[in-house]
Amino acid sequence: MCAMRWTRNFARVSAVFMLAVAAVCVAPAAHSQVNASSLVAKLHTSRTSPSDLEVSGDLAGVGPGETRFLTREDLLGVSQAMTIKPGDGNYTVPAHVKAVPLEDLTTALGVPAGDMVIAICKDEYRAHYSRAYLAAHHPALVMELNGRALSDWPKDDEGNDPGPYEIAHENFKPAFMILAARDEPQIPWGVVRLEFRDEESVVGAIAPHGTHASGEAVQDGFKIAQQNCFRCHNSGAEGGLKSGVTWTVLAAMAANSPDFFAEYVRDPQAKNPKTQMAASPEYDDATMRALITYFQLFAPREAH
Ligand code: HEC
């Protein structure tokens, strides 16, 4: 659901729609501040509607493992009018949305400064927003596009709409390049849940360990895997469950069949016509070597 296909259809549909309404769009209102106390007071202990956003993790006054809910109206009440430029890959023309910056949500919900934000989708895809990413790109949770709830937008061939929430950036500019891997906008749709979690412990689940951990290739591979693979592949309780293929399985492949591994990453469709994995054809040999060197560290001992 959070893979690319719907977004492509959506871009086409919305381009037509937005060109039609462009003439009547007014300038966005000045940014309002999210009122912290009002949002904490609105946390519901149980779901009231399918469009509710689940929230969990380090929230002020909420116990570990507990979940709370915010309604779409609660979120609209603290939202801002924003114009999303096409650079983040969500839309093909500037889009007028109502959205709440994730950083404002962390403040409004009393989340500790060392926490990251994890957006979880209907299909268990996960987008991980580190503190560095939040500061560089200011991602925002979108609840309305051109005056319509996201769930009211047209469905794709598989019956998926982009609702209840998606994440967009007003003006995304890549902040880094690691070998051939460019800093990528994290733009999930079908977002149903946000988790606010200690960044060190989440990322720690895939941090390299052992005597080769500090090597340059390993560190490069780690950063690439953190932004790309971790969305759909899990290591224990952390990372996306969309693929059902764990870090340990990927590691065994990197150790035993590095060529297959590289071919799969560059062009999964060539190996699996029904693949749901995003291709990374731009990863050159050095980039692939970094990823493989990194993943090999997680291989079961007998594979070495
Ligand atoms: C959008 C989700 C997504 C992302 C991102 C993703 N994968 Fe996958 N991956 C999958 C899914 C789903 C499968 C299961 C088969 C399929 O659909 O291709 C898979 C399968 C694989 C396989 C083959 C496993 C097998 O059993 O044959 C490899 C290798 C792999 N992924 C490596 C990676 C690496 C390395 C990265 C990061 C550079 C990555 N994937 C990023 C979704 C993803």
Image (tube, grey):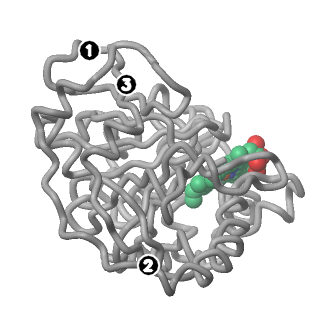
Give the Cα distance between marks 2 and 1: 44 Å
Graded by Cα atoms within 10 Å as few (under 14), some (14 to 19) or many (20 or more), the crowding at tag 3 reads many
Q: Name the residue under label 2.
A: 25
| Labels 2 and 1: the sequence-earlier one | 2
Contact? badges 3 and 1 (CB < 8 Å): no
Contact? badges 2 and 1 (CB < 8 Å): no
Task: Tell me: residue 156, above or below residue 64.
Answer: below
Residue type highlighted by circle 2: Cys
Q: Name the residue under label 1.
A: 64
Residue type highlighted by circle 3: Phe
User: What x and y, as percent, mark residue 246?
Assistant: 60, 35
Circle 1 sits in a helix, a strand or a loop, which is it? Answer: loop
Q: Residue at x 37, y 74 (%)?
A: 83
Task: Tell me: residue 246, above or below residue 257.
Answer: above
Q: In this view, does 95 lie to the left or right of 12?
A: left
Q: Which residue is drawn at 51% across and 25% down?
A: 49
Q: Which residue is drawn at 89% across and 57% down?
A: 273
Q: Does the residue labelled 2 lie within 8 Å of ligand 1?
A: no
Which label sits in the foreground, 3 or 1? 3
Circle 3 sits in a helix, a strand or a loop, which is it? Answer: strand
